[in-house]
Image: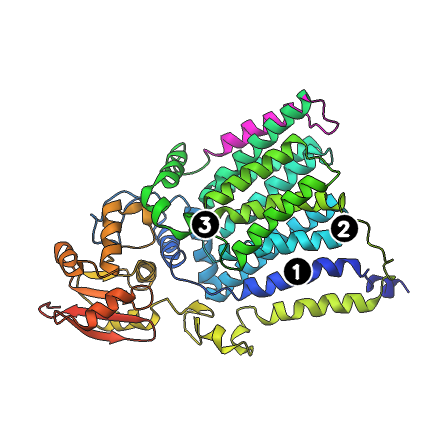
């Protein structure tokens, strides 16, 4: 009888498990674009192999090799490389999938705690995960997800009196890890500041739920000290400031632009804002100052750039669940008793998630429209985006040479697969001058491209005929250039009088 009871579960958690499993399925199928993975992997390899963190350009021929560059996410790069060395791209992909499920699962459970409703937790999880679909590619940012969730959950529970102040000692240790893996570490001090300011206001307003400020201030001090536990010391803050104010990054990068109401992720983001506005207007629950500050701060952050929407979803959706539980009527039907069938359904929900893990995904009969987005059967591993120049780089390995003008994302893969072939540009956007990026755009749009290529001395081109279609069309009619290679996505051209 005891064994049977262990196999039973209530039906209510299934509401929560449905969006969690759906999210796990879709995140596992996110293709790997070349931009922000391969060059980070190469830096991780260099750090492990040489025992030091690089400090210069190294790979771009349009700048001196010794041009300074800060590799602030050095530990995140090392972790990616160690995973890759241990199990190839499948292990790296699986790690991303597991971290995403853990992070958003914790956010969903926090929504359940705040609302005491599995249904509202399911809604909060679906919204938070849905608006984050544009932010799930494999890159060092994945190492920020759990530290951010850890900061948010610990501070929220401390504020509500459900966490002893001594448990906050985890925050400096989290920060010591976070500051070395990704630039989003700045969100840790931002959360602490918001909780401190909100807590102060709650004391001034005599709010019934006000946290003790002394331990919060003390842990903030220790966490700020932990910021300096990195190879750059205080220089990491200067690096973060330069990145956040870098003109090419801020004006040319799509993910740094404000989200537009196009695409499913951005539509869900705007839908969540509408739901928040309705809930704030109609709910009997009144937000305390801390929660209001969190909503406003992270909404402003999300509106300032698409790459920040994921953080807004994690912070705001549990608050939305709490607002809705004070707005919506109780569920009118009683829940059935726990049954083994519910446990079986929970397991079945996650069987598709298991099936699309990287070791087996290529055996799953997914729509051809999906397989057209990736290199199927690539020796690199599964789900490598079709925009990765796998075959073209193999051609370059057999036919090296030339001063190569390349599509930006191609630069990332070249750094990994063929580092001796120096690149025109790559996704280290802040490394290259703004005027160089403007020239890159002009060339890609076939605007005075021969004049600009001659000025830089480029005699070989490796272009994406989809992303650089104007240039591809112009070259087809240009007698100065000869097409030497072409595949599904990539073209390689050389100048007629160029000798290799």
**Would you call the spot at circle 1 few (<14 residues within 10 Å), some (14-19), or many (20 or more)?**
many
Figure check: 127 above or below 355: above
- Label 1: which residue? 19
> What is the C-alpha distance between the residues marked 2 and 1?
15 Å
Tell whether position 208 is magenta.
Answer: yes
Select label 3 or label 2 by which is in front. Answer: 2
Q: Residue furthest top?
A: 204
Q: Is residue 237 left or right of residue 295?
A: left
Measuring 62% from the left and 44% from the top, which residue is drawn there? Answer: 316
Q: Residues in magenta?
A: 205-228
Q: Is residue 369 left or right of residue 108?
A: left
Question: Can you say which quadrant of the picture contains the N terminus?
Answer: bottom right
Residue sitting nearer the eye, 316 or 26: 316
Q: Which residue is mark 2?
A: 117
Observer-nearest of 439 and 381: 439
Q: Is residue 468 left or right of residue 231?
A: left
Determine the secondary structure under disc 2.
loop
Q: For this view, does 453 lie left or right of residue 444?
A: left
Helix, strand or loop under label 3: helix
């Amino acid at each position: 009888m005891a064994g049977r009871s262990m196999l039973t579960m209530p039906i209510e958690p299934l509401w929560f498990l449905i969006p969690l499993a759906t999210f796990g399925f879709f995140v596992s199928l996110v293709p790997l674009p070349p931009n922000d993975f391969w060059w980070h992997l190469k830096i991780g390899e260099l750090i492990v192999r040489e025992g030091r963190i690089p400090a210069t350009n190294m790979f771009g021929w349009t700048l001196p090799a010794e041009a300074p560059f800060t590799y602030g996410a050095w530990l995140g790069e090392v972790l990616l490389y160690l995973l890759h060395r241990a199990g190839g791209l499948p292990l790296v992909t699986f790690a991303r999938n597991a971290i995403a499920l853990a992070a958003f699962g914790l956010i969903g459970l926090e929504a359940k705690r705040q609302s005491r409703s599995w249904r509202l937790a399911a809604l909060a999880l679906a919204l938070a995960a849905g608006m984050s679909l544009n932010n799930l590619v494999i890159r060092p940012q994945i190492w920020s997800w759990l530290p951010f969730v850890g900061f948010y959950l610990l501070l929220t529970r401390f504020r509500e009196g459900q966490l002893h102040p001594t448990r906050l000692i985890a925050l400096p240790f989290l920060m010591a890890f976070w500051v070395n893996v990704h630039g989003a570490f700045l969100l840790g001090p931002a959360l602490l500041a918001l909780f401190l300011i909100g807590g102060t206001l709650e004391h001034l307003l005599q709010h019934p739920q006000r946290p003790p400020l002394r331990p919060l201030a003390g842990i903030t001090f220790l966490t700020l000290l932990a910021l300096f536990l990195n190879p750059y010391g205080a220089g990491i803050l200067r690096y973060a400031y330069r990145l956040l104010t870098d003109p090419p990054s801020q004006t040319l990068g799509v993910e740094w632009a404000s989200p537009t109401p196009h695409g499913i992720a951005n539509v869900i983001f705007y839908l969540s804002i509408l739901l928040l506005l309705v809930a704030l207007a109609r709910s009997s629950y009144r937000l305390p100052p801390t929660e209001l500050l969190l909503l406003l701060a992270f909404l402003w952050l999300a509106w300032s750039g698409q790459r920040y929407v994921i953080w807004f979803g994690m912070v705001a959706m549990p608050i939305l669940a709490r607002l809705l539980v004070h707005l919506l009527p109780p569920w009118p039907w009683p829940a059935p008793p726990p049954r083994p069938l519910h446990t079986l359904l929970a397991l079945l929900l996650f069987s598709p998630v298991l099936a699309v893990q990287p070791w087996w995904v290529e055996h799953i009969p997914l729509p051809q429209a999906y397989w057209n987005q990736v290199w199927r059967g690539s020796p690199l591993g599964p789900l490598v985006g079709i925009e990765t120049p796998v075959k073209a780089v193999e051609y370059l390995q057999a036919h090296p040479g030339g001063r190569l003008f390349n599509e930006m994302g191609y630069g990332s893969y070249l750094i990994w697969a063929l580092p001796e072939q120096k690149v025109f540009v790559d996704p280290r956007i802040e490394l290259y001058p703004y005027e160089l990026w403007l020239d890159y755009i002009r060339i890609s749009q076939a605007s005075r491209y021969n004049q600009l290529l001659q000025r830089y001395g480029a005699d070989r081109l490796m272009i994406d005929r989809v992303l650089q279609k104007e240039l591809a069309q112009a070259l087809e009619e240009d007698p100065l250039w000869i097409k030497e290679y072409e595949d599904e996505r990539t073209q390689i051209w050389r100048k007629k009088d160029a000798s290799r």
